[in-house]
Amino acid sequence: MGENGNDKTTVTYLLEMISEGQDIADPSVSQRAKKVRDNFHNQYGFIYDTGGVLTGAQVQLEDIRNISVIGAGLMGHGIGLTYALGGYKVVLNDTREVILSNVISHIRNDLKAFAESGVISQDMIEEALSHLTTTTDLKKAVKDADFITETVVEDVEVKREIFSNLDVFCPEHTIFASNTSSLVLRDFTSQSRRRDRILITHWFNPPHIVPVVEVVRGEETSDETMELVCALLKKVKKVPVKILKEIPGFVVNRIQTGMLREVWSLWQQGIANPRDIDLAVKGSFGFRLAAIGPLETCDLAGLDLWYGIADRLFKVINDAHEPPEALKRKVEAGELGLKTRKGFFDYSQDESIKARDKKLIHLLKLLYSQ
Ligand SMILES: NC(=O)c1ccc[n+]([C@@H]2O[C@H](COP(=O)([O-])OP(=O)(O)OC[C@H]3O[C@@H](n4cnc5c(N)ncnc54)[C@H](O)[C@@H]3O)[C@@H](O)[C@H]2O)c1
């Protein structure tokens, strides 16, 4: 933190001192504590309450009205859209003005695609947009929030700073969720005074279309918080899946990466070309999986049959502990996929995202609309 105690890490620093057991209300403890406390007051206009754990009354689903989304990038815009469509007042916050100045038109286009496919009515476009506001001011963004989703860059320091600030800026009852895909909660929320009311909601891209959200329980998340957030997600037509313990990759990314290990190995060995590998998956078990889960598939074919298949194939399928060399070479050559216009396929003249969303919205309508 800067010597004058007046930079953006003031809150983090203050919370660190509290977690070290220093009574920052007592200036005799240290001059530094007094300076930080006074600067906090100057910067934010109120005296930070130095009490212990925030116990605030348990929020009920009907108490949730205002939702804030911190980070309005790829994931944040779709998460904000989903809650706005569900009738909630949503504030989108980002540090970059340019992101916020484009986000509403981006959301409008996504809502139009929903309307064109009949997932929502035309009226719902303006209705949902009327629920959305944007601001670069974090304090303003969260001061009335009942529920917050953080979805900023995957950087532990940035997230720690935000969660420290949220703890101070939000009402006591506010529930916090992070959309982190690779961190665990204790990495960036250990200073919080409401750790029973923090969890991970892990959305999938494109977040406004893909139905499932993994709801991941941290070491200290309460049962009530898990239940409430699952109910909230159901209310906005998502399919919450409870992950009872934080492990890297949760459930979905572990399964997906397990599959990719074999896919990349087959490609590297030249067993089939990229186009045919994708065709094979999309038109076979991929086609089935959208409707029938992997364990249902085992039951349908018979566990004895699958046991025999596993017994033979586990001995020969890939079990590497490192990503394949051929993939590394592609990354080093700057062939990163759509964003560099070349990956496994060529995207020099492409409308891939629009086309992808159109197909996915059809699937959504077919399989998930009542
Ligand atoms: N992209 C995916 O497919 C995906 C899927 C699941 C989860 N996630 C997770 O979601 C989070 C966001 O990913 P993304 O792909 O949307 O990233 P992104 O880069 O598109 O968006 C991140 C946004 O956060 C903003 N930001 C950075 N620091 C900020 C701060 N201090 N306060 C407010 N805004 C800030 C950036 O300006 C940017 O607009 C990450 O934790 C990522 O791991 C991503």
Image: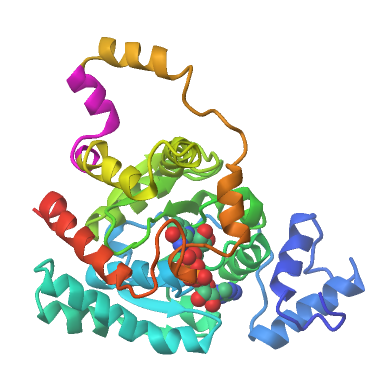
Which of 4/37 is in front?
4
Left of 240 or right of it: where is 98?
right
The quadrant in which residue 311 appears is top left
Q: Is residue 318 above or below residue 248?
A: above
Left of 61 or right of it: where is 149?
right
Q: Position of residue 363 (x, y in %)?
A: 17, 54
State which quarter of the image contains the N terminus.
bottom right
Q: Is residue 333 above or below residue 108?
A: above
The quadrant in which residue 295 appears is top left
Q: Is residue 140 above or below residue 265?
A: below
The quadrant in which residue 65 appears is bottom left
Q: Position of residue 176 (x, y in %)?
A: 48, 60
Q: Which residues are magenta?
A: 288-301
Identity of the residue drawn at 62% across and 38% down? 322
Identity of the residue drawn at 71% across and 68% down? 12
Which of 228/361 is in front?
361
Does residue 293 belong to the magenta stretch? Answer: yes
Which of 274/304 is in front?
274
